């Protein structure tokens, strides 16, 4: 079941992560920083959310969510017009996957386990300002 943080900021984050505890922690951290988060365990549910909601500023996805793999999710969102930054959360990644991530414009690959401080630092480095939001074409 998706979770939604209280919308307190113009920055909207699409979080796709298969591990419930990671979702819980990241949502709490992001909410404290006043981001609006839509979180899903399934890439299919995340695609549906992208198709039905107006925009997201950032994608954070697990390498292996339920459904499409994380890199396939990035590719599918790019095909649908998502131009915002993407962060991939991984336990491990092959050289071929790293090259594919680069080709898809993934800005950061964070290796699990990671600290919330390193997650927030990566987010601040890649997240556009609210004036430069990536809107989905109509």
Image (tube, rainbow, N blue to C red):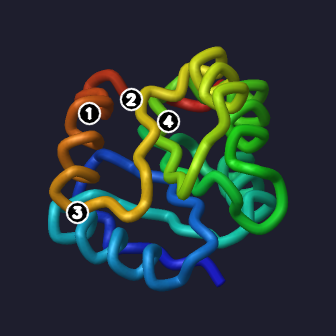
Q: Position of residue 75 (x, y in %)?
A: 74, 31
Pointer 4 residue: 86
Is 85 situated left or right of 115 in this image?
A: right
Residue 31, percent across and down? 25, 69
Mark 4 or 3: the one toward you: 3
Q: Residue at x 27, y 64 (%)?
A: 30
Vertical arrangement, residue 32 with respect to residue 61, above or below: below
Viewer-closest of 58 and 137: 58
Tag 2–tag 1 contact (CB < 8 Å)? yes
Q: Residues within 10 Å of mark 1 (few under 14, many from 20)?
A: few
Circle 1 sits on which residue? 130
Please, what secondary structure does the residue beneath circle 3 have? helix
Tell me the CA gap for discs 4 and 2.
13 Å
**Of circles 4 and 2, which is in front?**
4
Q: Secondary structure at mark 1?
A: helix
Q: What numbered label is drawn on residue 39?
A: none
Q: Position of residue 9 (x, y in %)?
A: 24, 54
* Residue tagged 3: 116
Q: Decide: marks 1, 4 in contact (CB < 8 A)?
A: no
Mark 1 to mark 3 CA distance (whole Å): 22 Å
**Measuring 54% from the left and 52% from the top, which residue is drawn there?**
90
């Amino acid at each position: 079941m998706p979770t939604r943080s209280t919308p307190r900021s113009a920055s909207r984050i699409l979080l796709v992560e298969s591990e419930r505890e990671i979702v819980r922690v990241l949502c709490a951290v992001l909410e404290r920083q006043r981001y609006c988060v839509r979180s899903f365990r399934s890439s299919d549910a995340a695609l549906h959310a992208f198709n039905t909601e107006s925009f997201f500023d950032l994608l954070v996805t697990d390498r292996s969510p339920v459904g499409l793999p994380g890199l396939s999710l990035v590719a599918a969102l790019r095909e649908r017009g998502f131009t915002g930054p993407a962060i991939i959360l991984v336990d491990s990644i092959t050289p071929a996957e790293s090259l594919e991530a680069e080709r898809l414009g993934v800005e950061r690959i964070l290796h699990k386990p990671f600290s919330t401080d390193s997650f927030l630092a990566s987010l601040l480095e890649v997240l556009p300002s609210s004036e430069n939001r990536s809107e989905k074409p109509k």
